[in-house]
Image (spheres, rainbow, N blue to C red):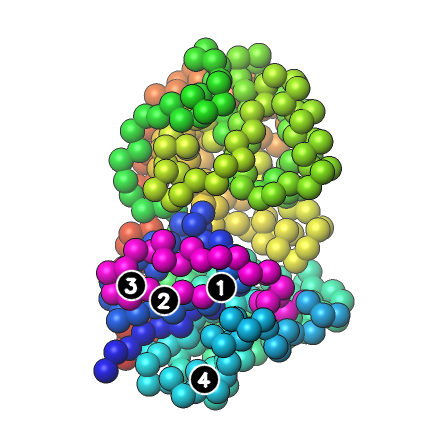
């Protein structure tokens, strides 16, 4: 009899999500199949299939979002998604699934709802944490209440490090003994050197490239990039790599940044096997996180980010010295690994770039050591798979 896993992933894309790709590759090798249901559609990975099979056509994120529809759950998703999530179908196929896995609060809530009749082992992959003391308003309170209800049945959880594990204990009530730590870093591979960004964007050879890769949101200091550049020496340029369609307002802002001649924008999504060449073509990695009051996942979830940043994992894999905002994780890790510098005001950023450039090889070596000792997910993925076999025999 074939046995597999059902994973509920509440987002449309996972190609830029290191842990999900690493974990799916490992699970697809160990189980007969892995069924991934996401806001991008649903897909099956059978033993030996490439993880790219999960990159499916996009459906609206609202099919999974518990806050859609005046704060109530979407109990009747669109047809293709509904077919995969129907509780009666899950109950009928109970013998085929060994466990059901929810990703983040939305995914866990939906997985728990599906599992009411099937009664499978319930697992949680936590990358975003809802902090109880930040939840206000009936839709979010209802969402947190449902997440807490589901958390009581979680047999095994994945979280990135001890900082975030402590937060998950306090705000979800999941026992620390039921957690496995897996940093959100890419799988190890030789990074080498690359000229991808210089060739693609026409960046002069004499310019030093500072890369920010990821969402252009307020929690990423998006609105302060132009002011930050005013403190940088003229030979440093900023490259913004993002893959989300920008609206007219953001496009106008990016156009103004481009007109300075010191900001380059890379908007083409890259397949996972080419991401390393993008990161390796920069000289420095920018990690400008700041907590904001925009939504439940931009406050303490950002401040206590720990080892959950995929871009930081890629920076370290490629040996990039990092320029980082004043967050607990960077103060803690950079005191042990001299792989970057922390700024408390953007006026310091230019001097810190020059400082790192003065000892570039030392910072680069420390960044590579930081990856090997802290961001390499290999051991954590292996430990999670072992625990999963015990939780879902």
Secondary structure of the residue carrying tag 4 is helix
Mark 1–mark 2 distance (CA, rounded to whole Å):
11 Å
Mark 3 or 4: the one toward you: 4
Which stretch did the figure color magenta? 41-67
In the rendered image, which quarter is residue 370 located in?
Answer: top left
Mark 3–mark 1 distance (CA, rounded to whole Å):
18 Å
Comparing 203 with 209, the one in front is 203
Secondary structure of the residue carrying tag 1 is strand
Quarter of the figure with the C terminus: bottom left
Q: Is residue 129 magenta?
A: no
Q: Which mark is residue 41?
A: 1
Residue at image coords 40%, 26%: 196
Res. 299 visible in picture: yes
Residue at image coords 69%, 24%: 256
In the rendered image, which quarter is residue 363 located in?
Answer: top left
Residue at image coords 43%, 40%: 270
Residue hosting label 3: 28
Mark 2–mark 4 distance (CA, rounded to whole Å):
16 Å
For label 3, count other residues whose C-alpha is less than 10 Å away and answer few (under 14), some (14-19) or many (20+): many
């Amino acid at each position: 009899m074939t046995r597999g896993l059902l994973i509920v992933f509440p987002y449309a894309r996972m190609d830029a999500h290191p842990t999900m790709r690493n974990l799916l590759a490992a699970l697809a090798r160990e189980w007969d199949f892995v069924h991934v249901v996401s806001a991008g559609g649903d897909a099956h990975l059978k033993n030996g299939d490439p993880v790219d099979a999960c990159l499916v056509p996009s459906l609206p994120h609202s099919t999974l979002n518990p806050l859609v529809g005046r704060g109530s759950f979407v109990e009747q998703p669109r047809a293709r998604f509904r077919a995969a999530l129907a509780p009666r179908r899950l109950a009928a196929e109970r013998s085929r699934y060994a466990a059901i896995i929810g990703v983040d609060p939305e995914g866990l809530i939906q997985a728990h709802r599906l599992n009411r009749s099937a009664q499978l082992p319930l697992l949680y992959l936590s990358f975003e944490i809802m902090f109880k003391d930040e939840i206000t308003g009936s839709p979010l309170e209802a969402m947190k209440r449902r997440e807490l209800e589901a958390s009581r049945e979680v047999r095994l959880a994945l979280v990135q490090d001890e900082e975030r594990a402590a937060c998950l204990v306090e705000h979800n009530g999941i026992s620390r003994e039921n957690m496995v730590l897996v940093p959100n870093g890419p799988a190890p591979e030789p990074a080498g050197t690359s000229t991808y960004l210089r060739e693609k964007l026409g960046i002069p050879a004499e310019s030093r490239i500072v890369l920010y890769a990821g969402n252009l949101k307020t929690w990423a200091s998006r609105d302060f990039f132009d002011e930050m550049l005013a403190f940088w020496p003229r030979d440093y340029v900023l490259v913004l790599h993002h893959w989300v369609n920008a609206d007219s307002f953001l496009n106008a802002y990016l156009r103004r940044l481009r007109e300075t001649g010191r900001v380059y924008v890379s908007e083409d999504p890259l397949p996972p096997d080419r991401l390393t060449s993008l990161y390796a073509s920069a000289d420095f990695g920018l990690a400008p996180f700041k907590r904001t009051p925009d939504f439940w996942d931009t406050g303490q979830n950002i401040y206590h980010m720990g080892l959950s940043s995929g871009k930081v994992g890629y920076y370290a894999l490629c040996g990039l010295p990092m320029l980082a905002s004043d967050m607990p994780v960077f103060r803690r890790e950079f005191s042990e690994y001299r792989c970057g510098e922390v700024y408390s005001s953007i006026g310091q950023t230019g001097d810190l770039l020059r400082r790192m450039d003065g000892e570039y090889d030392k910072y680069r070596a420390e960044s590579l050591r930081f990856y090997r000792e802290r961001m390499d997910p290999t051991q954590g993925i292996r430990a999670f798979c072992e625990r999963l076999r015990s939780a879902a025999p």
